[in-house]
Amino acid sequence: MFFRAAWSLALRKGRLGMRGIHSPGDTAHSKGKMPPYTNYHAQRSYPMPDEPFCTELNAEQRALKEKEKGSWTQLSHAEKVALYRLQFHETFAEMNRRSNEWKTVMGGVFFFFGFTALLIWWQRVYVFPKKPITLTDEWKARQLQRILDMRGNPVQGLASRWDYEKKEWKK
């Protein structure tokens, strides 16, 4: 609690970092950005970012930017591409390109399916009790024979479908 209050106070005074000025309905603006953060954000639904992709230019790039102010017919194709790359990180074709992320997702799904199958197998072998004797084929055959011997439900049940003289099922 104390640490959070001290950190907030230090940031307000401007000693540890540069904080942006934020107004309602607008984005935060700052004169100096902290190193890992930029305001560059481009995607298919919002292709025009607020600032260019490259903000710190070297001498060659600055010369190209000066040449850009002149006639574009004098620029070569490679220079136009270089100018585009200074402004934007990706083209629409590169943004729309399929990624191989589905392979990772499917690999994860199949891994968890396999793990679940192993867990179920382990539970059936070591956790769940043995099958009750009433589920064995021998027990079911004896139970059926008992029902037939008692002539249970002779009008519409099993006994009505059993031929007692031939000892077989009626056809």
Image (cartoon, helix red, strand yellow):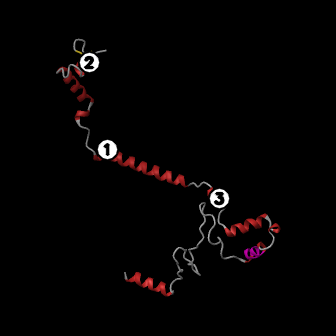
For image coordinates 25% across by 12% down, the residue present is 166
Mark number for residue 94? 3
x, y percentage for residue 89? 65, 66
For label 2, the SS is helix
Task: Determine the image quadrant of residue 33.
Answer: bottom right
Mark number for residue 136? none
Mark number for residue 124? 1
At label 1, which amino acid type do we have?
Arg
Task: State if disc 3 and disc 1 touch (CB < 8 Å).
Answer: no
Please state which of the two labelled residues, at mark 2 or mark 1, is closer to the viewer: 2
For image coordinates 26% across by 38% down, the residue present is 131
Give the farthest residue toward the front: 25
At label 3, which amino acid type do we have?
Glu
For label 1, the SS is helix
For label 3, the SS is helix
x, y percentage for residue 91? 67, 61
Q: Residues within 10 Å of mark 3 (few under 14, many from 20)?
A: few
At label 2, which amino acid type do we have?
Arg
What is the magenta range? 60-66
Give the distance between the C-alpha atoms of the residues marked 1 and 3, in whole angstroms.
50 Å
146 to 129, vertically: above or below: above
Does the magenta segment cover residue 65? yes
The quarter of the picture where the N terminus appears is: bottom left
x, y percentage for residue 31? 59, 81
Front-most of residues 109 and 51: 51
Kindly identify which residue carries mark 2. 161
41 to 56, vertically: above or below: above
